Image: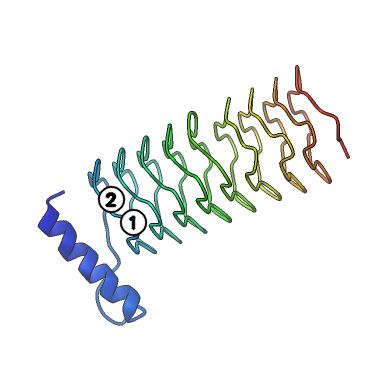
């Protein structure tokens, strides 16, 4: 997308946010190419970013609350402290993304690919993570209580001391996952694959 056109769209979107919808319009950036762009701290609440290319972009502290980001490419992007509360990221590619301290609470990440992502203190509470791929990730210090991880791939992940209270892990792949010290209170592990998993605190 041309820089000047993007500026016009974002200006109109900012006016929409400022006037609470009385002026301006919600940004429709579907299928746009933002690869390698710097959108540091932008307010993109409610925007349509479905199928957008945001790979390698600087998106630190961007506000994506209530955004549509379905099947978007966010691979290798910098998303530290970004807000994805209630955003729809179904099928999105977050491979190797930097997600430290990002907030995905109440978001929908069904089928998202997070392999190779950095997830220090990332908040996934109450989010839908069904069929998502967290394989081999170090998830220590992440928040996953009450998350829906049905059929998620957590094979080989490090979940040491993670709070999984009331999480749904039905049919999840937890093979060779380290769950030592994790809070598994009221966790649903129905039909989960626990082959080779390390566990010492099953409530």
Where residue 176 appears, as percent x and y from the top left, is 70, 20
Where residue 104 appears, as percent x and y from the top left, is 53, 52
52, 203: nearer the viewer: 203
On the picture, is 45 further left or further right than 12?
right
Residues at marks 2 and 1, CA–CA distance in whole angstroms: 6 Å
Question: Circle 2 is placed at which residue position?
Answer: 30
Q: Place residue 199 in its image quadrant.
A: top right
Where residue 49 appears, as percent x and y from the top left, is 33, 51
Residue 48 shows which numbered tag? Answer: 1
Residue 134 lies, with reference to residue 71, above or below; the image says above
Q: Residues within 10 Å of mark 1 (few under 14, many from 20)?
A: many
Residue at the spot 49% in from the left edge and 34% down from the top edge: 114
Element class at badge 2? loop
Residue at the spot 32% in from the left edge and 81% down from the top edge: 19
Q: Earlier in the sequence, mark 2 or mark 1?
A: 2
Residue 91 lies, with reference to residue 136, above or below; the image says below
Callout 2–callout 1 Cβ contact below 8 Å? yes
Name the image quarter holding the C terminus.
Answer: top right
79, 24: nearer the viewer: 79
Residue at the spot 41% in from the left edge and 58% down from the top edge: 64
Element class at badge 1? loop
Q: Spot the residue most to the right.
A: 203
Residue at the spot 41% in from the left edge and 47% down from the top edge: 79
């Amino acid at each position: 997308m041309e820089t000047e056109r993007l500026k016009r769209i974002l200006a109109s979107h900012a006016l929409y946010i400022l006037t609470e919808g009385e002026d301006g319009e919600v940004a429709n950036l579907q299928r746009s190419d933002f690869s390698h762009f710097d959108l540091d701290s932008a307010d993109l609440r409610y925007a349509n970013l479905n199928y957008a290319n945001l790979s390698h972009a600087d998106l630190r502290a961007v506000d994506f609350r209530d955004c549509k980001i379905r099947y978007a490419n966010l691979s290798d992007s910098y998303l530290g402290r970004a807000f994805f509360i209630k955003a729809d990221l179904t099928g999105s590619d977050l491979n190797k993304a930097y997600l430290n301290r990002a907030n995905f609470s109440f978001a929908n990440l069904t089928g998202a690919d997070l392999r190779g992502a950095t997830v220090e203190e990332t908040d996934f509470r109450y989010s839908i993570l069904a069929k998502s791929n967290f394989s081999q990730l170090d998830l220590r210090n992440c928040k996953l209580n009450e998350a829906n991880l049905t059929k998620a791939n957590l094979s080989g992940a490090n979940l040491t001391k993670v709070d999984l209270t009331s999480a749904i892990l039905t049919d999840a792949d937890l093979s060779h996952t380290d769950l030592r010290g994790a809070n598994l209170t009221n966790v649903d592990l129905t039909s989960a694959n626990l082959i080779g998993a390390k566990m010492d605190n099953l409530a």
